Amino acid sequence: MSDSQKKVGFISLGCPKALVDSERILTQLKIDGYDIVPTYQDADVVVVNTCGFIDDAKRESLETIGEALHENGKVIVTGCMGGDAEQITSIHPGVLSVTGPQAYEEVVGAVHKYVPQIKTHDPFTDLVPPQGIKLTPRHYAYLKISEGCNHRCTFCIIPSLRGDLVSRPIGDVMEEAERLVKAGVQELLVISQDTSAYGVDTKYRTGFWQGTPIKTRMKELCAALGEFGVWVRLHYVYPYPHVDDIIPMMADGKILPYLDIPFQHGSPSVLKAMKRPAHAENTLERIHKWRAICPDLTLRSTFITGFPGETEQDFEIMLNWLEEAQLDRVGCFKYSAVEGAKANEIDGAVPEEVKQERFERFMEVQSRISAKRLQTKIGKTMEVIIDEVDEEGAIGRTAADAPEIDGLVFLNGETELMPGDLVTAKIFQADEHDLWAELAHPEQ
Ligand code: SF4
């Protein structure tokens, strides 16, 4: 690094989709010769990638921008909250520029404008690794397959922030996946707003991968990714009929037997009011069918309690649904009105104390289910991917656990392992979140 090299501080807030945007911006900045630094003091400018999904996230974004302005003074804002520049500039008029999500070129352009490089970047001495800059550890990576969403769920403003679905060409997605695998990635996490809708916008256009025609469609993508021999995990899938086609691939070990499906509710009338994708599907029947084909299938989901118009009866339908579905991992949110969301116009706002009470009842039921399901793993031997190693031992995950959001496996005393190692371990203890295990073959 030369002294004249300009330095950029970068703060990435929000979901994995925003993280992928951050990785793209950072990769471009690095290619352009900027250095990325971890402190406000060292940076010539700070980029904040914001999240505007719910009010708490907006608050956090505004606080972060305020902190960056105070500590550094030169701040460029991008991301979901940047879709409405006014809400940022009215509070922080000192920011240099505001752009919305996926505005990679504008953000990079703003960095060039406010902290121009003195020396031209030399691509032969300042090489960026071919897989780009990743914010996740080296052994797993998010693979974004599309932007935007064609649905109009009434509680969500993402389509107005990110626009309609635009699927990436399948050849590009596969090339990126190949680069990541060659760089040592052991786990690919497929993300989008609606993974099951991949290719709908292009009418499943035929692309090319290694000279062979391949359709831009979830099933074909899963089959192709499954050939890399690394873990492939699917996030944000909706229970459309064609999801049935990928369950056999999971049963055959081609992709991980893991589905992240944001069901959000169990009552048909609430799902209809939410305008959820595939709300008319009989999801319980589908779940039973999937588990019959792939008994190891892990189902993760999120739910909302206290959606406007939710009655006690709706809520009880959801609890019964939960009891029958026996999901493995579940997150729950109390409904909070997001500015600009259609759901705010629905009658029957649920009082805060009722939301809270339902949230607690919901979590009580789900904690019992999650704990019971984890108990069944005791005594089993499973593959574990190692994420972290410290002086106390190693921490990893099984195929049933996505990074950041699911549970962990503790391998106490295993200080010789390395992040990214795949080991076989025997589970001997469980609580409602995590597992404890010992190596099945201690010499591995
Ligand atoms: S599927 Fe619904 S919740 Fe998800 S991004 Fe699209 S509109 Fe929002």
Image: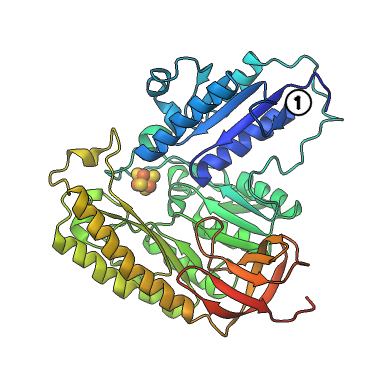
Q: Looking at the image, which is closer to me, 350 or 263?
A: 350
Picture quarter containing residue 28? top right
Residue at left offset 54%, top offset 65%: 401
Position above or below: 125 against 177: above
Q: Looking at the image, can residue 263 be seen?
A: yes
Residue 92: give x, y in percent of width and height.
Answer: 44, 19
Pick out the residue farthest to the right.
125
- Write down the residue under mark 1: 33
The answer to whether residue 308 is above or below residue 63 is below
Residue 57, above or below 121: below
Q: Nearer the viewer, residue 336 or 292?
A: 336
Say how many tags the image has: 1
Q: Please, what secondary structure does the residue beneath circle 1 have?
A: loop
x and y percent of residue 62 in the render?
44, 29
Q: Position of residue 243 (x, y in %)?
A: 43, 63
User: Does residue 162 sit above or below 5 in this rendering?
Assistant: below
Q: Which residue lies at the image location 68% right of the left edge and 28% below the top edge?
A: 29
The answer to whether any part of residue 294 appears in the image is no
Residue occupying the point 61% across, 47% down: 173
Q: Is residue 133 left or right of residue 50?
A: right
Residue type at numbered disc 1: Gly
Of 70 and 48, the residue lying toward us: 70
Q: Quadrant of residue 279?
A: bottom left
Choose between 81 and 101: the one closer to the eye: 81
